[in-house]
Image (cartoon, rainbow, N blue to C red):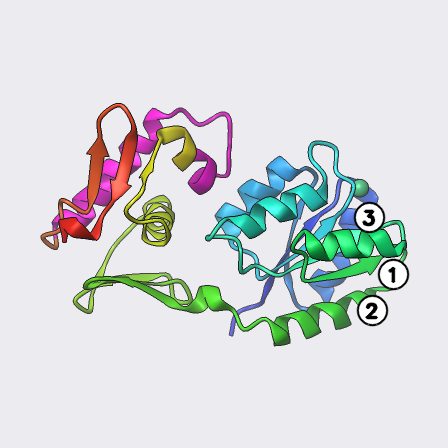
Amino acid sequence: MSARKILVVEDETAIRDMLVFNLGRAGYEVLGAGTAQEARSAIVNCQPDVILMDWMLPDISGLELTRQLKREPETREIPVIMVTARGQEDDRVAGLEGGADDYITKPFSSRELQARIRALLRRTTPAHDATVRVGELALDSASHRVTIKGEEIALGPTEYRLLSFFLHNSERVYSRSQILDRVWGGNVYVEERTVDVHIRRLRKALSKHGHDKLIQTVRGAGYRFSSAGM
Ligand code: CA
């Protein structure tokens, strides 16, 4: 099995570097993010197995980011450990109510952190490993494979994420900006027409297997994935 991925969201560079270094030495693949915005991009691009989330971040709080992640189907299953500098009971409760799966209070030892991560990985049977099926189309997020009637279809990484989003959110219309937010992670530097380009590629891949009507253009509104087109 490949190394489990941990995303360290922490704006203080010295602390982040130390955590990245220590967890890397412990055998994890570690990514760092200094803002909520960077964290969102890293989550979309790298699909971490655990997120270590600092409470105090410069853009939005770690608590608010956790709330957002736990509301969205694509990120809801990723376990979050909230890091708080304050040890008050109120913060712990707020963190857990906000959707964090565990919390740890600064300062903590590397050993304590690793024990928490191991425990969390053990108890969170990753539901995001499950296969999502719509009709004869299946997406297996453990192996990153998409099949139609058992036959694998080749997709680029963005088309894969787009399809994964649609499979989790079928039968509803999404605007280009909503799709950008959810699939690209709200990166403001991506133009809306980028969505059209990737939708076109995804449609092309699906149409090779006779499914050219799964993704519907809803004029003036956006796109909808519907199994009615199957
Ligand atoms: Ca901080």
Q: Which residues are magenta?
A: 180-208
Q: Is mark 3 within 8 Å of ligand 1?
A: yes
The residue carrying mark 1 is 108
Amino acid identity at mark 3:
Ile
**Counting residues from the N terminus, which is met first, the one under dot 3 or under dot 1?**
3
The reply to whether dot 2 and dot 1 touch (C-beta < 8 Å) is yes
- Per the image, label 3 sits on a secondary structure element best described as helix
Q: Amino acid at mark 1?
A: Phe
Mark closer to the observer (2, 3):
2
Question: Disc 2 marks which amino acid?
Answer: Glu
Q: Which residue sits at x=68%, y=51%?
A: 98
Residue 97 appears anywhere in the view: yes
Q: CA distance from mark 3 to mark 1?
A: 11 Å
Q: Quadrant of residue 56?
A: top right
In percent of width and height, residue 228 lies at: 16, 51
**Majority SS type along the magenta span:** helix
Judging by the rendered image, the residue that carries numbered circle 2 is 112
